[in-house]
Image: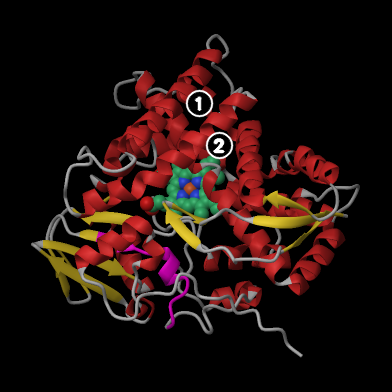
Amino acid sequence: MAIDTTIAERPVPPKGRLSFPMLILRMIANPVASWGEDFYEEPAVLYRWLGLQTLYVMDPVLIQRILLEDAGSYSKQPLNDDVFGEAIGGGLLNAEGEEWRWQRRLAAPLFRAEEMLRYVPAFASVCTPLLKRWQDSGAGALQRIDRDMTGTTLQALQDTVLGAGLGEDDRGAIQEAGATFLFYSMWKVALTSLRLPPTIPHPGAQKMARAGKKLREIAQKVLASRNGASEGDDLLGRLVTARDPATGDAMPAGLIVDNVVTFLMAGHETTSQALTWSLYLLALFPDWQERVREGVLGLAHDGGIGCDEISKPTLLDAVFQEAMRLYSPAPVLMRRTIAPVALDGIKLNKGATIIIPIYVVHRHKLLWEEPLKFDPSRFSPEAKAGRHRCAYMPFGAGPRTCIGATFAMLEGKTILATLLSRARFELPDGELPVPLARITLRPKQGLTLKVIPL
Ligand code: HEM
């Protein structure tokens, strides 16, 4: 008998469409709980309120227009600055125009697919201390998987592209400050959505400011520790030796710090959530866990998994992608129109807010059959070939697409394969996790699983 692999819809979307003020209030608590049932059935939903226009776009054709074909009519600013500015300033994620192009060109060589493959052994090695700790805890011990994945992905980033000598205290401080910053960020998203200045006092504002400052202090410390050893083809080395193509000037110290914080934050938290949700789904559906484990053990040789195997479209790949469909680690993209635009008959003024709720796109009833069913066969090469490129977009799309996408895929799959080949994961009794969007998508109360070392 076929086993039902449909996940429960939690939180349940509101039945009717919420008023804009109510939507903003719900969004502060959890954006996933603010999108009504109609969002999952309509191509787009437009809100007009007190002269503000906010368009939620779910139709892949319209998304392609916004992010690719007519990308020049839309800006990340001032939304991104209002929300993240305190921590990441004008770094790659936030920059626009020539400033962005320069930074992207500078970092791009580090993220070429050929470069990434040589990191596979390092991705596997970061699992060793974690597996040992799980082994020492005994079979069936409960483990906080979300925290373990955050620590592991931060270590992976440090050991590969970053080139930063972070101590254990630094890593702990980054995790804590990063989590605090993201936790209160929804207030800033609410303020910017209402066109209010981000400096208006709100709950957690001071904690956010302190967390942003802490992240920048760590970045500065890391940079100082590199003085005299600034060369090297890692991220820090490239930032320190970069020259502005127009002026020939070095990158200003503040902008280097902006980028170190950007990569520290963007480079581990999302992959950590992708791994957390993957392990949750595999614990929820043990038959799938066994199938993936069998596949992974078949790939391994000499105790490890090779670079070639990990980059192939295996079942492991399909499972990781399906996990990112159901639980998109970056659930929302935001833009603002910089000129009047017409999108499929919808006329928007300059300054209108565009929200692309990737979470909704990935569960949309017009795009996916049985959207709540965990079904990795959606990622077979044939199934993928027939799908619109913007119907599945965990890494965004267009020029501002994630620079770390290949890195994240290789890292995620290598860590998942290494953990599955050495341990079994089971759900303990109790509540199932509820997705909570805080820029990234995390389980509201964390994720605790029973881990049985093999
Ligand atoms: C599963 C893991 C990841 C997911 C789901 C993810 C998702 C995304 C998305 C959706 C964007 C586009 C944002 C927008 O258009 O507004 C983005 C941008 C970005 N990501 Fe990732 N990301 C992941 C991993 C990484 C990693 C590993 C790194 C670096 C090591 C990274 C660095 C960045 C940077 C710097 C940008 C800004 C790029 C630009 O604007 O040019 N990300 N990411």
Residue 94 horizontal side relative to residue 218, left or right: left
Farthest residue in the bottom direction? 1
Crowdedness of circle 1 by 10 Å Cα count: few (<14), some, many (20+)?
Answer: some
Which of 348/426 is in front? 426
Give me the residue at 59% from left, 34% from top. 161
**Mark 1: secondary structure:** helix
Q: Is residue 360 magenta?
A: yes
Q: Which mark is residue 110?
A: 2
Farthest residue in the right direction? 302
Task: Tell me the quarter of the image containing the C terminus.
Answer: bottom right
Which of 184/159 is in front? 184
Q: Position of residue 100 (x, y in %)?
A: 34, 39
Give the residues in magenta.
Answer: 354-365
Label 1, on which residue?
238
Give me the residue at 39% from left, 56% from top. 398
Give me the residue at 34% from left, 63% from top. 356
Which of 243/137 is in front? 137
Q: Position of residue 342 (x, y in %)?
A: 17, 69
Alpha-carbon span between mark 1 and mark 2: 9 Å
Asked if labels 2 and 1 touch by Cβ distance under 8 angstroms, the answer is yes
Is residue 90 among the parts visible in the rendering?
Answer: no
Q: Position of residue 442 (x, y in %)?
A: 52, 55
Residue 186 horizontal side relative to residue 343, left or right: right
Residue 120 horizontal side relative to residue 22, left or right: right
Q: Is residue 157 magenta?
A: no
Give me the residue at 65% from left, 38% from top. 156
Is residue 413 among the parts visible in the rendering?
Answer: yes
Q: How is the image coloured?
A: secondary structure
